[in-house]
Image: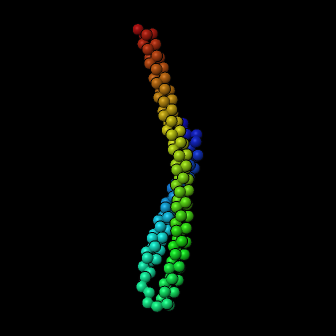
Amino acid sequence: MTFPLAGLLRVRDAQERVAAEQLSRTSSARLQAETAEQGAVVSLAEISAQVDDAPTLLAMAAARAAGRSALSDVQALTEMRRAEEAEAKAAHVEARRELRGLERLEDAHRVESARIAQHAEQTALDEIAVVRSRREKRTA
């Protein structure tokens, strides 16, 4: 006896795999954003603090302002990537939960089908034994 929800089980399995792939991609994007953020922090920290004249001071101030702006953008991107990863993780958990529910139903169906088959086999064996017993009583 086939599992009546086998088609839905295949769909849920495919959905779970897609959700896992999406989670993997968003985790990778988050890691890249965090790496970029760390690089921006290091770059900003490496701006020289030595000022020899006014043009150098202006250049250093402009570099720091640009660095802070870039860092702010990268930090916003990192937060956005973290939020995307959290959403992907929640979607994967939900897809996995739905898949596990159907897998449990399939397991229960398999157990019940085996029980029914064993019962039918035992009934047939009992019937054979009864018929054989009646034949032996008649010949005796």
Quadrant in the picture for residue 140: top left
Identify which residue, 27 or 7, lies in the foreground.
27
What residue appears at the point 52 percent right and 36 percent down from the top-left corner? 109
Quadrant in the picture for residue 133: top left
Q: How is the image coloured?
A: rainbow
Above or below for 73 versus 17: below
Residue 103 visible to an observer of this rendering: yes
Residue 81 at x, y percent in the picture? 53, 64
Q: Residue furthest top?
A: 140
Above or below for 119 versus 88: above
What residue appears at the point 55 percent right and 46 percent down from the top-left corner? 98
Residue 85 at x, y percent in the picture? 52, 59
Residue 58 at x, y percent in the picture? 51, 86
The N terminus, quarter of image: top right
Above or below for 16 versus 101: below
What residue appears at the point 46 percent right and 16 percent down from the top-left corner? 130
How many numbered dots are placed on residues in this image?
0
Above or below for 127 versus 17: above
Identify which residue, 45 or 105, lies in the foreground.
45
Identify which residue, 8 or 48, lies in the foreground.
48
Identify which residue, 84 or 68, lies in the foreground.
68
What residue appears at the point 52 percent right and 55 percent down from the top-left corner? 89
Residue 99 visible to an observer of this rendering: no
